[in-house]
Every structure is written in structure tokens, then in C-alpha cells.
């Protein structure tokens, strides 16, 4: 199976099915079908990669930031957690820039404080969060076609 021609960093997801390759792009390969399932540019070139199978995420070290990606490629539904009855979408710890890769996430529309106040409109790609106070925020997706808020909510921790 041909993969990226550059010298990049790679790791497997928690199931061992998907190979994530990082350089200036993130490419995800399905090892069962020998096919590319996703590719998106990184905001900064990758320097190091560390998978965290217990949390179901991959940490990508870049210059002054650490990017956190879910280790399930787009189009692959995560299994339900029977105890909570909800999806485990994890948390992201960010500093300075919140990068939302369009190929991996449906574009969220807003960032909310813990008290439910909208603090920032978001778009796919880089979002400057340096003006926010350190703390916990929540990312909520756009409204559905019938006007209800998207049920997918993601926790984001902003640090200095």
C-alpha cells in the first residue's frame, strides 16, 4: 500500500486497524482495505506523535502546541458507553490556537464557557483563543436542519 512519500511520524489507533501518518498533513489509512480514508493539513509540521489508547486519542507535538486528535477516522462511529449511554468524545487541551480539522470533525459553530455563555464563533481551521481566560470551555456543533442544537458537545481546556 503506498503511503505518504515524506518522512513523517506514524502510529496505530487503539484497535490496530487504522494507521495515522503525520508530517505537514495527517493521513489515515485503513489497514484492512489498504486504502486512504482521510487526509487533512496540519496547522504546523509534526515533531512527535504519541498515541493514547486508553483515551482513544493521538497527541501530535508541533512547535509550541500539542494537537489532540480522536483515533477514529471520519465516518467510523464510536461505540456507545453502556454505563453513561453517551459517546466518549474526550477532551482537548489547547494553548493559543484551537485547530478544527475539517476532514475529522463536523465544523462546530460556537465555543461556550462553563456557565453556558457563548464566548467565540468558530470555523474550520485555526481559531485564535489567546484572548480567553484559562479554563474549561465547551464546543457545540451547528444547529440541525430542524433548528435544534447539535447533540455533539466537546470539552476544551484552554491553558496559558
Image: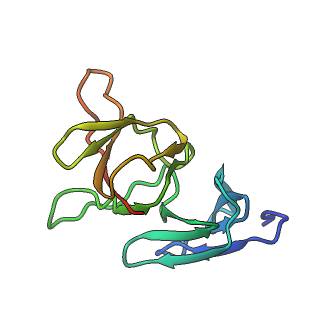
Q: Residue at x 45, y 77 (%)?
A: 52
Hey, which residue is sitting farthest right in the picture? 5
Specify whether 131 is left or right of 88: right
Q: Is residue 155 above or below residue 8?
A: above
Q: Position of residue 72 (x, y in %)?
A: 48, 61
Compared to residue 58, the image places residue 107 above or below, namely above
| As drawn, 142 above or below 20 | above
Instruction: State which quadrant residue 8 falls in.
Output: bottom right
Residue depicted at 26% across the width and 41% down the height:
151
Which is nearer the eye, 159 or 25? 159
| Quadrant housing the C terminus | bottom left
Pick the quarter of the image with the N terminus: bottom right
The picture quadrant where one finds residue 139 is top left
Residue 128: horizontal and vertical position, in percent?
A: 50, 45
Name the foreground residue: 48 vs 36.
48
Q: Is residue 153 visible?
A: no
- In the current view of this chain or complex, which residue is farthest to the top? 146
Q: Position of residue 18 (x, y in %)?
A: 58, 67
Q: In the image, is residue 56 above or below residue 131?
A: below
Residue 55 in which image quadrant: bottom left
Q: How many numbered discs?
A: 0
Q: How is the image coloured?
A: rainbow
- Residue 5 % position (x, y): 85, 64
| Residue 89 seen in this snapshot | yes
Amino acid at each position: 500500500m503506498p503511503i505518504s512519500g515524506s518522512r513523517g511520524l506514524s502510529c496505530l489507533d487503539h484497535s490496530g486497524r487504522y494507521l495515522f501518518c503525520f508530517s505537514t498533513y495527517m493521513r489515515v489509512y485503513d489497514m484492512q482495505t489498504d486504502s486512504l480514508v482521510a487526509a487533512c493539513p496540519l496547522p504546523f509540521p509534526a515533531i512527535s506523535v504519541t498515541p493514547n489508547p486508553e483515551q482513544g486519542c493521538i497527541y501530535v507535538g508541533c512547535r509550541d502546541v500539542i494537537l489532540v486528535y480522536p483515533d477514529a477516522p471520519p465516518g467510523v462511529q464510536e461505540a456507545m458507553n453502556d454505563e453513561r449511554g453517551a459517546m466518549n468524545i474526550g477532551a482537548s487541551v489547547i494553548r493559543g490556537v484551537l485547530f478544527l480539522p475539517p476532514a475529522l470533525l463536523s465544523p462546530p459553530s460556537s465555543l461556550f464557557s462553563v456557565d453556558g455563555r457563548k464566548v467565540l464563533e468558530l470555523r474550520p481551521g485555526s481559531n485564535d483563543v489567546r484572548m480567553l481566560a484559562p479554563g474549561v470551555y465547551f464546543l457545540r456543533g451547528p444547529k440541525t436542519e430542524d433548528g435544534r442544537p447539535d447533540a455533539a458537545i466537546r470539552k476544551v481546556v484552554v491553558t496559558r
